[in-house]
Image (tube, rainbow, N blue to C red):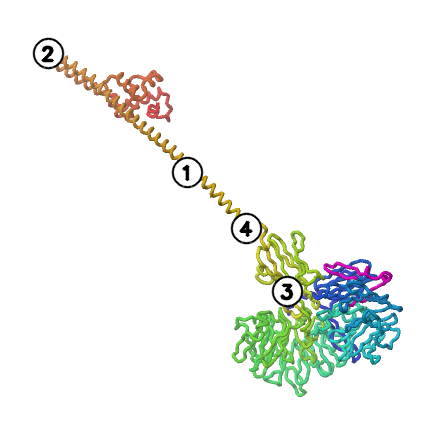
Amino acid sequence: MNNYYIIDKSIIIHIVLLLLASSTFAETGKYPIKNFSPADYEAGIQNIDFAQNRDMTLFVANNLGVLSFNGNDWEIHAYRTGKKQRSLAFDETNNRLYVGSQGDFGYFDNDWNYVSLVEKIPTGLRDFDEVWDVFIEDNVVYFCTFQGIFIYNGREINVIVNETGFNRSFHLSSKLFTQNSEGKLIEIKGGNLSPAYAQNKAGRIVSGLIAKDNGYLVFYNSGEIEFASSFGVTDDLPQLSAALEGKYVNHVTELSDTRLVIATQRSGLYLYDVITDEIENITVEDGLQGNACLRTFQDNSGNLWVGMQNGMALVDINSPMRLINQKIDLQGSGYEAFESDEGIYYTTSNGIYFLPDGESKCTFLQGTEGPSYGIQKILNRIYAGHHTGLFLLEAGKARRIAATNGIWNVKQLKSNPKFAIGGTYSGLYLFRINENQELEGVQRIKGFSESSKFFEEDNSGSIWVGQFYKGLYKLQLNADLKSAIAEKVSDRYDLPIKDHIILSRIDNDIYIATERGIYLIDQVKDQIVEAEMFSEVVGKSWVYLLVQGSNKNIYIYTENNVGFYKQVSSNNYVYVPSSLFQLRHSFNNDLLNVSVNIQDGVMFNANEGFINYKSELEDRLSTIKEPLISRVYVVDDDSILFERLPFENKSETKNSLTITQGIRVLQFMVESFKFKDIGDRKFRYLLKGFDKDYSEWTDATIKEYTNLKEGDYEFYVQSLNSFGEHITSQPFHIKVEPPFYRTGFMKFIYFIIVVLIMIKIYQFQRQYYRRKQANLDRVRKEELSEKQLELQRLKDEKVQSELSHLNNLLAASTMNLVVKNEFMENIKEELKEVNLKAEISERRQALEKIVKEIDKTLKLQEDWQQFEYHFDRVHGDFLTRLTNEFTDLTPGEQKLCAFLRLKMDTKEIANLMAISLRGVEVARYRLRKKFNLETHQNLSKFILEY
């Protein structure tokens, strides 16, 4: 079966068992004990005295210094001064820890600042050895040595001396007692010594005084006990005195429940119940790391601290739990215990054991070697399931009555009381009750072969089986009970009942414990529903154990809780958390079980033996101290922002702290003062305003936060007490202010600066826009002037262009007129000649000549020089420049250039020059040669650009 927890043995609390042969000794079990060795607290071996402040910090007088313990860490002070620390007393009025040591005494205050009071002792009385006791009464401190009693009233020191010296002193019932070197009791009254009660044990040293009735119990080192009063002295507590005979008694303490604790030099601790006369002895065999017990001290939570010759121990003296195991010769992991008239039977992983009534040691029942399981009583016969079958237990012996493949448990059928069914490794096994009223094996029930550790019969006679790994089954038995029809019910429901389930009968109903809460089999409606009775506490937690006891208490163990539901009325239960929570890692988590057939409490099976739990002994009234924030630390610059000093005056106001944003790592340190379950401390943290919820549980006592933004925060720490309940600290308020440059004052300065800057910007912009406007006006004027000049230039160019164009036209027209005038003049002359001709033939010839001349004139027969003149004027002396550069140009080529300059096409040029188009192309080619033009150069472009 799966383990529910991984067990860390280093944190399991040591448990011890006392079971003495004498009938006056209590046969309970071992108390939870936590031992501390010198290696744990890193100081000397001897621990002589204890004290505690109101914050519950524990102080210990160690031979190498003064120890302090807050539930998390040990610290040592006044370390290696060469003086052994012997006695302590805490003054809550003045917040001082008074200390007595070798040849010195004084007090610690503030942050462990030591103030010696030796200088206040009158001269001549400063020679003394160990200060064995320190007491505070009415704000007066008494430092008790063997040489004198030093009384400090806060101002001065008075000294009481005695001719025969002193021995150990005592403080009880507002009275102070001491004794002389021969053990004679003396009362200290008003700084004087007065005889105390009479004593019969002359020459014996008193080791303890306990108030009783109108007198005192006087304990001697020898172990003898007297009762002394104003009526005389008598021997008392003979049973305890007999137990202490020959034991050297070092110290006696009365517990808050009136029990007495006697610390001995060689025999450990003795606990004596003055009401029942029961005696318990706790020794090395029971878990102490040594038998030399020097002193005991009960802290504010009721725990018993034991100062020892080599280390110290913490005993949960009020624990409702005891462990039953090796002390009674019980070996192996426990499964079930069953108490009968003849004794107690135990089934374990090793086999079956029997503890006869009145005996202190178990006997192993031969033949039961191997794992054994559930015990059931049927018709006054006790049966135990076993790896090899079913055993009948009677008269302290075991007899196998059926050999099967392992039986978990056996139960009598309600619907057919003459038969019983056993759950085996591979299904169910049928038994019948024979004529001797004993179970007798019949056969394995056919039709079902799953492991059946958990099975229950419902009101209709159906058998429900919870197979831990496979789910829930319902079996209908045939009439002869030898076979069954099985249905896997878990497949019908969308519920967490398909694996990890446990069946339990509670008040005649069948419940299913699952990994997500508890469900009820509703036998009336034939359906499975959530069990409302458990939902508030259990919720959706994984449930590992659910068992109802004979007293109707329902014991439950979940991933978050260990406790029981107590019946307050019919069908009305209230949940009570249990201190079993601190021992949950000690449970036998492979086969969890609770034995309810025990007269005194119940038995939880454990990894080793059993845990006897008595719910009525739960101490719910002991002081529960919430965790405290002890220090707030800045990791960045190694500075402390807040620290709780051990001896400072306590403020009633809530702790608060104001810091500036920019701290990268803020560290919180906490103290828990959890003494009962030191090995199982857990914390979780919440910074309200930063975290959404508490962190996961951890054993770290330090929590760090990085880069907190400005705002208000509240820091909380939660711990678990011995009942598994959440204990929350008081809030620690933290205000993160912005850095100086973001404070309100600086924001005001920034506002003023911004206003001034805005004014300056306004002024600058005003001047800027003024200058800009002036520049714009100037630019506009300049642009306007430039545009006017440009416009004028364009107008001039236009006029010039027009004039040039007109000149060109004029030149062209002039040329034409010239040509025409010359031509007309020639015609007139020739006509005159014709008119002089007499002959018609001559006239005809003359006219024909005129016609030819007209044709010739029409074919560009003009005066080229006149044309050249006008053309050069229009085209910037083009022909002149051209002929000057290219002297080999013919008149025809010059004309061709002129016509190309005038942008005439080839056809026009051919007509004007009276040549063919081919002739024009040839002429152009010749020009290109004369101009030395490359093939890619254009002739017309060259002439136009020339």
Q: Which comes sooner in the sequence, label 2 or label 1?
A: 1
Q: Position of residue 361 (x, y in %)?
A: 77, 77
Q: Which residues are magenta?
A: 106-135
Please name the residue that numbered disc 2 is placed on: 838
- x, y percentage for residue 585? 68, 68
Q: Quadrant of residue 132?
A: bottom right
Distance of label 2 from label 4 (alpha carbons): 130 Å
The residue that disc 1 covers is: 773
Disc 4 target residue = 747
Question: Between residues 333 and 644, which one lies in front from this camera angle?
Answer: 644
Residue mark closest to the camera, 2 vs 1: 1
Q: Provide the secondary structure element on which disc 4 rests.
A: helix
- Lower sequence index among marks 2 and 3: 3
Q: Which is closer to the viewer, label 4 or label 3?
A: 4
In this rendering, is residue 74 above or below 924? below
User: Residue 713's mark?
Assistant: none
The amino acid type, in three-letter code, at marker 4 is Lys
Query: Which of label 2 and label 3 is nearer to you?
Result: 3
In percent of width and height, residue 849 lies at 17, 15
Measure how far apart labels 4 and 1 are at the Cα level.
37 Å
- The C terminus, quarter of image: top left
Answer whether residue 579 is magenta in the image.
Answer: no
Local SS, label 2:
loop
Which circle's residue, 4 or 3, is located before the other in the chain? 3
246 on left or right of 908: right
The quarter of the image holding the N terminus is: bottom right
Whether the residues at callouts 4 and 1 have beta carbons within 8 Å, the answer is no
Q: CA distance from mark 4 to mark 3?
A: 37 Å
Residue ID for mark 3 = 729
Q: Distance from label 2 to label 1 (Cα)? A: 96 Å
For mark 3, does the 10 Å Cα neighbourhood hold few (<14), some (14 to 19), or many (20 or more) residues?
some
User: Which is nearer the N-term, disc 4 or disc 1?
Assistant: 4
